[in-house]
């Protein structure tokens, strides 16, 4: 897989937002530590995100992050059988916030497949079509 997401370590003004954009942040938990001359602030909360899909679709979602967005975006390159319009979002759960953060890999694909690509018929669809022919009502 090829990581294609923006570098969230870069300032938002300098970050590439052509594919994935953070729209805002709502803090759920805040903490401030005073170390004499320096003061450190930490927070955890929800990021409102937009993923711009080829074909004009926009996926809007909320993502929980602590000490950063903690989100990666991948695509399988075409030379390995991938497509330009299918994305994988990977996120790790945060053990400090088990009731708020979720983890996993999510597959994002277009709502409608392009007309020029024929749909593959797998064993399940062939089986369903075969049982549909024998349906006596």
Image (tube, rainbow, N blue to C red):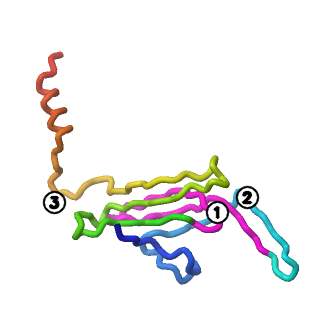
Distance between mark 3 and mark 2 Cα atoms: 49 Å
Q: Where on the picture, by quarter, is residue 24?
A: bottom right
Rendered image: mark on residue 116: 3
In the image, residue 9 above or below residue 1: below
Asked whether disc 1 touches disc 2, contact meaning CB atoms under 8 Å apart, the reply is yes
Image quadrant where one finds the C terminus: top left
Distance between mark 1 and mark 3 Cα atoms: 43 Å
- Label 2, on which residue? 29
Residue 105 at x, y percent in the picture: 43, 55
Residue at (54% x, 74% y) in the render: 8
Residue at (50% x, 76% y) in the render: 7
Q: Secondary structure at mark 2?
A: strand
- Label 1, on which residue? 66
In the image, residue 45 above or below residue 15: above
Q: Secondary structure at mark 3?
A: loop
Residue at (56% x, 55% y) in the render: 93
Q: Which residues are magenta?
A: 40-69
């Amino acid at each position: 897989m090829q990581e294609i997401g923006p570098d969230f370590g870069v300032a938002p003004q300098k970050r590439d937002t052509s594919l994935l954009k953070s729209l805002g942040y709502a803090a759920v938990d805040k903490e401030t530590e005073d170390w004499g001359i320096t003061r450190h602030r930490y927070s955890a909360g929800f990021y409102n995100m937009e993923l711009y899909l080829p074909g004009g679709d926009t996926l809007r979602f909320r993502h929980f992050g602590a000490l950063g967005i903690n989100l990666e975006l991948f695509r399988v390159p075409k030379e390995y059988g991938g497509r330009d319009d299918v994305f994988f979002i990977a996120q790790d759960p945060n053990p400090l916030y088990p009731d708020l953060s979720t983890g996993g890999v999510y597959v994002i694909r277009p709502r409608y497949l392009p007309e020029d690509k024929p749909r593959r018929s797998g064993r399940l669809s062939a089986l369903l079509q075969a049982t549909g022919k024998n349906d006596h009502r």
